[in-house]
Image (tube, rainbow, N blue to C red):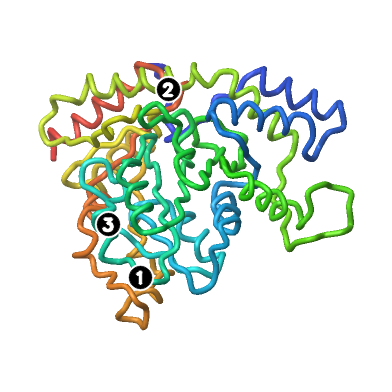
Amino acid sequence: MNMQKTFLPQVSPWFGEEEIANVVSTLKNNWITEGPMTKEFGDKLNKLMNVEYGVFAPNGTLALFLGLLALEIGTGDEVLVPDCTFIGSANSVLLTGAKPVFIEVNNYNYQIDVKKAKKLLTTRTKAIMPVHLYGMSANMNEVMEFARENNLFVIEDAAQGVGVNYNNKHVGTFGDVGCFSFFADKTISTGEGGYVVTNNENIYKKLLLLRNQGRYNRGSFIHPAIGYNFRITDMQAAVGLAQLEKLQQIINRKFEIYSLYLKYLNEVPGLNFLKVEKGSNIVPFRFLIFVEDAEAAMKFLEEKGIQSRSFFYPMHKQPCFNFLDIHNGGSQDLSDNNFANSVYGYEHGICLPIYPTLADDDVKFICDTIKEFLLNE
């Protein structure tokens, strides 16, 4: 390891001369809003995911909001959302006027447990939102069967899922809509940005209207529908195109780092790991471990110059969602004993860095630090 390096961040995007050249070219061509780069980026994303249609959004949360609106989810409706996820998943539901209903996750890879969802179905339940967490797929066979049996829309939160496949099909393309994010810590990044995909032409037409002020084409002042400004810029798309060109390199390097973590930590007593869903590949978002005292471990790592983070804070415990609790006038019992797995994940889970520029020696240093902590615990 470079001994001058005193800090290993939990994430670092891999940008190079290609991204810079693309952005400069865009500026020189005076395309600063959506233009040819955006179209090319969208076409290549559709090809990657083998999907018919896609539209951009400013970020992953608004991509979910846009997708929900296109499914006509709104006030009085309920959407099933996993308890272990980023808050944007639940917030996108609230933005529509609908209510998120939190579902416990399984204990082996923290994806939504549809068996726990059955008892929470009501006449108001309109959709289920599987979240493909930490760079692996949820069990989409179970999700799709559950949705068919209960006449539910499926909106996939694939924010962390670019490059992830389930039974040789790209995540985000199983349900009615799928939503992606290009935030700084995602597999490919445009800084901010989101993408909504669908194979349904009618849904696509609704997406087009909703994201562009209720019109199909810019330049018209006649608006047949209510819509919003959910556009991105060609500068972002220019970065995205360069990122797509090296997507396979990014995936390969992430997997190399993932394999190194397993090599160094697999036999360490006191450590447990997530299991990849059968049928899914993994494009590692972070390397995840479970320890007895995660808070102390993260503090120890920070003292050594290694940034890490916890698992997501359970949705049912978020202070801003107290109004959903039956004890506060809501309709769902949000007691911890209904969400033992997501609570355990937050209290014992640690996310370690995985990004392409992380050196092999850095990975060994992180693993040695984990071992040192466990030895002295």
Instruction: Residue 221: tell me if it is visible.
Output: yes
Residue 368 horizontal side relative to residue 193, left or right: left
Q: Amino acid at mark 3?
A: Glu
Say if 225 sits above or below 4 in the image.
below
Instruction: Determine which residue is flagged by label 1.
Output: 122
* Residue nearest the observer in this picture, 67 or 319: 67
The answer to whether 299 is drawn above or below residue 51 in the figure is below
Q: Could you say where residue 154 lies in the image, as x and y percent from the top left?
A: 45, 51
Question: What amino acid is found at the position of numbered circle 1 in the picture?
Answer: Thr
**Disc 1 secondary structure class:** loop
First of labels 2, 1 by sequence position: 1
Which picture quadrant has residue 17?
top right
Mark 2–mark 1 distance (CA, rounded to whole Å) = 47 Å
Camera-near label (3 vs 1) is 1
Give the spatial CA distance, label 3 vs label 1: 17 Å
Which three-letter amino acid code belongs to the residue tagged 2?
Answer: Leu
User: Is there a contact, CB below 8 Å, between mark 3 and mark 1?
Assistant: no
- Judging by the rendered image, the residue that carries numbered circle 2 is 358
State the residue at coordinates (44%, 58%).
127
Position of the N terminus, as image quadrant, is top left
Circle 3 is placed at which residue position? 104
Residue placed at 60% from the left, 55% from the top?
A: 70
Q: Earlier in the sequence, mark 2 or mark 3?
A: 3
Camera-side residue of 344 and 361:
344
